[in-house]
Amino acid sequence: MSETVTTTLNDVDIGSVVSLVEKVQQEPDVAATKWNAEVKWKGGFRSEAQIRDFVTARSDEPDQLGGTNTGPNPVEQVLGALGNCLAVGYAANATVAGITISDLTINVEGDLDLHTFLGLTEGHAGFGNISVKVKLDSDASPEALQALHDKVISTSPVGHTLNRAVPVDIQLT
């Protein structure tokens, strides 16, 4: 077993990541994880997601969609989840590559046609397109930043989830 290294580059404890990689290499079944959230309706279009032991994440629709605008709506949360996942990917992979990130901003935008959601037509109710713009400030070479970007895109769990059909089983119990 190799020595665990702790680094503060980009505020990432890469030793924890290295330890996890080693554990998965030794025991591949450890990689099969399950994540969950419990969502409780709070009236109107408001709900709250309880995830692990964190403060609940609020959800609501904006005023123009009949909500009370007390939190981001579910499609905004999807965009935020993608951006957050990419940020983790940049931080982790930059640290492994020895790249210092001075600043990172990820703008995520999605096009959504409300016709199906509002019951006005049959069809796809989800995003028709999602675009992401990454502003990454670093003193690394353009080639190193492109390699970092390619690595992040190729390993993003949320990015992969959104880029392919995922079976979703929704049951009324």
Image: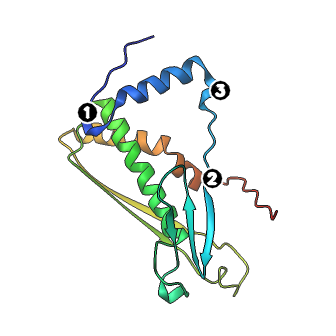
Q: Colour scheme in the image?
A: rainbow
In the drawing, what numbered circle is on residue 29? 3
Mark closer to the chain start, 2 or 1: 1
Pinpoint residue 152: horizontal percent, then vertical percent: 42, 42
Residue type at mark 2: give it.
Arg
Please identify the quadrant where the C terminus is shown: bottom right
Residue 109, quarter of the rendered image: bottom left
Q: What residue appears at the point 67 percent right and 80 percent down from the top-left corner?
A: 116
Residue 43 horizontal side relative to residue 173, left or right = left
Pinpoint residue 155: horizontal percent, then vertical percent: 49, 40
Mark closer to the chain start, 2 or 3: 3
State the separation of the CA atoms marked 1 and 3: 29 Å
Label 2 sits on a secondary structure element that is loop
Pinpoint residue 54: horizontal percent, then vertical percent: 48, 53
User: 37 or 118, which lies in front?
Assistant: 37
Categorize mark 3 by other alpha carbons within 10 Å: few (<14), some (14-19), many (20+): few
Residue type at mark 3: give it.
Asp
In the drawing, what numbered circle is on residue 164? 2
Please identify the quadrant where the N terminus is shown: top left
Closer to us: mark 2 or mark 1? 1
Please name the residue that numbered disc 1 is placed on: 8
Closer to us: mark 2 or mark 3? 3
State the separation of the CA atoms marked 2 and 3: 24 Å
Q: What residue appears at the point 73 percent right and 79 percent down from the top-left corner?
A: 122
Would you place residue 10 above or below residue 81 in this image? Answer: above
State the separation of the CA atoms marked 2 and 1: 35 Å
In contact (CB < 8 Å): disc 2 and disc 3: no
Residue 151 horizontal side relative to residue 143, left or right = right
Residue 83, quarter of the rendered image: bottom left
Mark closer to the chain start, 1 or 3: 1
